[in-house]
Image (cartoon, grey):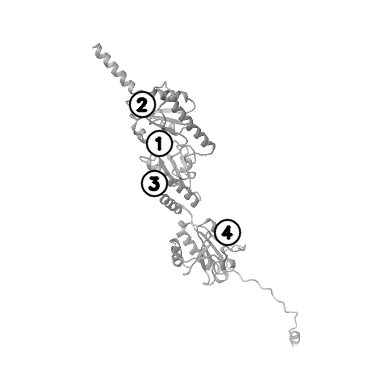
């Protein structure tokens, strides 16, 4: 009986030894799926992490060296260990295929580097200090990873992530729920391969969408592994999950493509659905023309008949047609302008307007200084056909006369009233002797 007890005791001791390569008394920090993100990913420190299996002979031989290196690096570099046999999901996230595997988590925590050095404490310490030097020099040169908040960094995909807004449990409601803007929010996990593939597309789309919608549609990202309250609230079950938030409405899932063009197209649809119709501005100064045409891919310029030819009701009917077309094509985000015939004669000449009479319309690309003229009727149907051709890249164009906009004259804006003929001076003939006038002519 005593022999069996001894054997049982030895077996138990061996079992415990095999499963306890590190203890709380060591300077090696034990890492698990529960604390990995908080300890490593969110840390500003450099980390060396060993992924091991307790039964692995190479791991057992590394253990004293790893402990010695951890003690030497204490307060300088963090040294951790993951039982990847027990926590296989965590090992799988970092592509661990054999034991021991050592990873270096530097400036970009989600792009860990493989340690390829020796398995002695001296070699480990030297590699740690070399990696630390690179991290510090990178900070000195201003290099950093991740989204704009700097709290998280994801594997670089070559895109600038400055326009992706990082959201957290604490910042989400005040930024999104109470906003008048439209938000497209990606819920991601740092280890998710699909999220890493989406990242450069999301980042590139964020910049383009910010520019085209003047910041009215925002692209954001939430690390759902850290911000679990948000993940739970919105039922996030897989990664990446993208949701669309609009004021006063329940969030809806984005189910479109994952390329930047797909994302941009959806964002512009959301913008146009929520945006007011474009402004229709009268060209009363050079600033109005330049600011409108420089800010849009195309500016649609109409030259309307003189007010004496149409009256207020006639002019308003033309303006109504333009406003309807501006609403119809608002997704294009073009600029819309008008002027009265003769008020900007140099501009008319540069756009070849006048030969077809008034009203007339030209679509101008100010970047290329080219324009296309409406040849059909100035009506909803005629203008729609003209703009539809332009929107698909068809239609003949010509260079703007002189290669630039001519001088624009400052004029008073239309007051909305019918025009009046100029008042002529009355001629008083009471003191004139008409008979004498006749004699002088003779």
Q: Earlier in the sequence, mark 3 or mark 2?
A: 2
Quarter of the image where one finds residue 440: bottom right
Horizontal and vertical percent for residue 187?
41, 41
Give the CA separation, mark 2 to mark 4. 73 Å
Q: Residues within 10 Å of mark 2 (few under 14, many from 20)?
A: many
Q: Nearer the viewer, residue 344 or 400?
A: 400
| Quadrant location, the C terminus | bottom right
Q: Residues within 10 Å of mark 3 (few under 14, many from 20)?
A: few
SS for dot 3: strand
Nearer the observer, disc 2 or disc 4? 2
Horizontal and vertical percent for residue 221?
44, 42
Mark 2 near mark 4, Cβ–Cβ under 8 Å?
no
Residue located beneath label 4 in the image: 288
Q: Nearer the viewer, residue 53 or 246?
A: 53
Give the CA separation, mark 4 to mark 3. 39 Å
Give the CA separation, mark 3 to mark 2. 48 Å
Give the CA separation, mark 1 to mark 3. 21 Å
Nearer the observer, disc 3 or disc 2? 2
């Amino acid at each position: 009986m005593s022999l069996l007890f001894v054997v049982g005791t030895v077996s138990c001791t061996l079992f415990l030894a095999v499963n306890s390569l590190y203890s709380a008394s060591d300077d090696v920090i034990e890492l698990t799926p529960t604390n990995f993100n908080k300890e490593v990913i969110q840390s500003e420190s450099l980390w060396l992490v060993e992924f091991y299996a307790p039964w692995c002979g190479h791991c057992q031989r590394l253990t004293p060296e790893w402990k010695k290196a951890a003690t030497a690096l204490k307060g300088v570099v963090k040294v951790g260990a993951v039982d990847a046999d027990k926590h296989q999901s965590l090992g799988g996230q970092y592509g661990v295929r054999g034991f021991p595997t050592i990873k270096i988590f530097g400036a970009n925590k989600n792009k860990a580097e493989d340690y390829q050095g020796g398995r002695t404490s001296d070699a480990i310490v030297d590699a740690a200090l070399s990696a630390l030097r690179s991290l510090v020099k990178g900070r000195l040169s201003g290099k950093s990873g991740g989204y704009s908040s700097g709290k998280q960094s994801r594997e670089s995909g070559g895109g600038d992530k400055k326009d992706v807004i990082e959201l957290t449990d604490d910042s989400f409601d005040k930024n999104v729920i109470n906003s008048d803007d439209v938000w497209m929010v990606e819920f991601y996990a740092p280890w998710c391969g699909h999220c890493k593939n989406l990242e450069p597309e999301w980042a590139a789309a964020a910049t383009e969408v910010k520019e085209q919608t003047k910041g009215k549609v925002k692209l954001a990202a939430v690390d759902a592994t850290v911000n679990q309250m948000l993940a739970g609230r919105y039922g996030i079950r897989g990664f990446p999950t993208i949701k669309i938030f609009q004021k006063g409405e329940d969030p809806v899932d984005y189910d479109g493509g994952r390329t930047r063009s797909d994302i941009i197209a959806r964002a512009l649809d959301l913008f146009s659905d929520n945006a007011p119709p474009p402004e229709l501005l009268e060209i009363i100064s050079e600033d109005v023309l330049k600011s409108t045409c420089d800010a849009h891919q195309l500016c649609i310029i109409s030259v309307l008949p003189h007010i004496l030819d149409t009256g207020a009701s006639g002019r308003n009917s033309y303006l109504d047609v333009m406003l309807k077309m501006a609403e119809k094509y608002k997704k294009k985000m073009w600029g819309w302008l008008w002027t009265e015939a003769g008020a900007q004669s140099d501009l008319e000449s540069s756009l070849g307007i006048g030969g077809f009479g008034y009203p007339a319309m030209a679509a101008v690309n100010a970047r290329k200084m080219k324009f296309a003229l409406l040849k059909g009727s100035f009506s909803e149907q005629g203008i729609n056909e003209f703009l539809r051709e332009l929107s698909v890249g068809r239609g003949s164009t010509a260079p703007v006369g002189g290669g630039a906009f001519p001088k624009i004259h400052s004029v008073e804006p239309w007051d909305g009233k019918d025009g009046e003929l100029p008042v002529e001076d009355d001629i008083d003939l009471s003191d004139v002797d008409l008979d004498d006038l006749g004699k002088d002519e003779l």
